[in-house]
């Protein structure tokens, strides 16, 4: 099989490497010409000088996989691609798009006879070695065509990928996956901070996280990564206490509100990230001021 990959960043580039090593031909394009050249040199990827050029190097049914930032970049590329494609061709969005956008794009492309698949893609920088977890949405016909490609990208042909439902369901599933991820990360962060705060025990967090990796109820790949990081540095003094949030964490909380389903852990985990991003700390300044006003509690002043 053969496809075009548009967007060769950390995820897209490694996906190209895995596909090529698995016997799938790939035509690749990225605005960074040096990245295109490197993949061609190291992996044998077919190069393209533009999206239009990439499409001309495909045969029917032409498959174009996008690994682009969500929002306008993906929207503009889908709109630009449609006139270049024909009935029966397929566009795959493997980025972190909002599932509402995927539903709209899928419906618009269907009117033109172009297939669409939204692929929730997890695995990060480890996907090249371990494979990617792929949650895909689309029609059964599109899923059948895409199956050989998904099997190469996944950890194995039998596991780590699934056609979860119609267009939009892949990105919806990935959105909830990321919301859960927020909660898990926040739990580990709070628990480990409590362990570190018990100074009288002088606990070794690298030892404890490594211990938990074996037969503990909380063992997970997230714990594996945390344990490895703490082996290198427990103080984390060089790491700024600033945690960005992706759109998917926010969208998960909005979905909980829309459905009227309580999701306090996921919501609070998102709010805690907002707290880390507040460089002025104005809310905390107000809290201190209020405590002083009603109770005469001391206010700590900045230098």
Image (cartoon, helix red, strand yellow):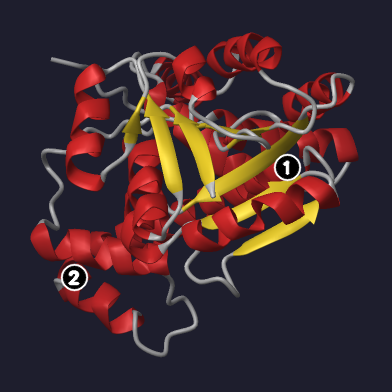
Q: Which mark is residue 206?
A: 2
Q: Is residue 109 shown above or below 119?
A: above
- Residue 19 appears left or right of 259: left
Name the residue rendered at 63%, 47% in the picture: 174
- Judged left or right of residue 29, residue 246 is right
- Which mark is nearer the camera, 2 or 1? 1
Asked if one can make out residue 263 in the rendered structure from this viewpoint, the answer is: no
Residue 303 versus residue 152 in the image, above or below: above
Q: How many marks?
A: 2
Residue drawn at x 43%, y 85% is: 216
The location of residue 115, given as percent across then percent down, is: 77, 33
- Residue drawn at the location 56% of the way across and 71% of the way down: 157
Label 1: which secondary element: helix
x and y, in percent, of residue 247 in the image: 57, 28
Whether residue 194 is situated above or below residue 168 in the rendered picture = below
Tell me what residue is drawn at x 52 percent, y 39 percent.
3
Q: Nearer the viewer, residue 281 or 34?
A: 34
Residue closer to the observer: 172 or 184: 172
């Amino acid at each position: 099989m053969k496809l075009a990959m548009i967007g060769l960043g950390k995820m897209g580039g490694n996906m190209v490497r895995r596909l090529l090593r698995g016997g799938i031909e790939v035509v690749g394009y990225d605005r960074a010409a040096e990245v295109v050249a490197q993949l061609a040199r190291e992996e044998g990827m077919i190069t393209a000088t533009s999206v239009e050029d990439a499409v001309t190097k495909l045969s029917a049914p032409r498959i174009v996989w996008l690994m682009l930032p969500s929002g306008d970049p993906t929207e503009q590329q889908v709109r630009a691609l449609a006139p270049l494609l024909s009935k029966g061709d397929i566009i795959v969005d493997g980025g972190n798009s909002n599932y509402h956008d995927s539903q709209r794009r899928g419906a618009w492309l269907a009117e033109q006879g172009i297939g669409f698949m939204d692929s929730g893609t997890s695995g990060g920088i480890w996907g090249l070695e371990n494979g990617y977890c792929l949650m895909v949405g689309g029609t059964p016909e599109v899923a059948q065509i895409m199956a050989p490609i998904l099997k190469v990208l996944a950890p194995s042909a039998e596991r780590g990928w699934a056609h979860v439902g119609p267009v939009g369901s892949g990105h919806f599933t990935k959105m909830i996956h990321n919301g859960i991820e927020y909660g898990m990360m926040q739990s580990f962060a709070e628990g480990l901070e409590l362990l570190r705060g018990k100074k009288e025990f002088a606990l070794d967090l690298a030892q404890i996280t490594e211990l938990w990796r074996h037969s503990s109820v909380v063992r997970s790949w997230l714990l594996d990564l945390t344990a490895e990081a703490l082996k290198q540095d427990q103080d984390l003094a060089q790491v700024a206490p600033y945690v960005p949030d992706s759109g998917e964490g926010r969208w998960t909380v909005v979905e909980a509100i829309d459905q009227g389903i309580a999701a306090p852990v996921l919501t609070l985990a998102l709010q805690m990230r907002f707290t880390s991003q507040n460089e002025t700390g104005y809310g905390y300044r107000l809290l201190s001021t209020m405590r002083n006003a009603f109770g005469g509690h001391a206010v700590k002043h900045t230098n």
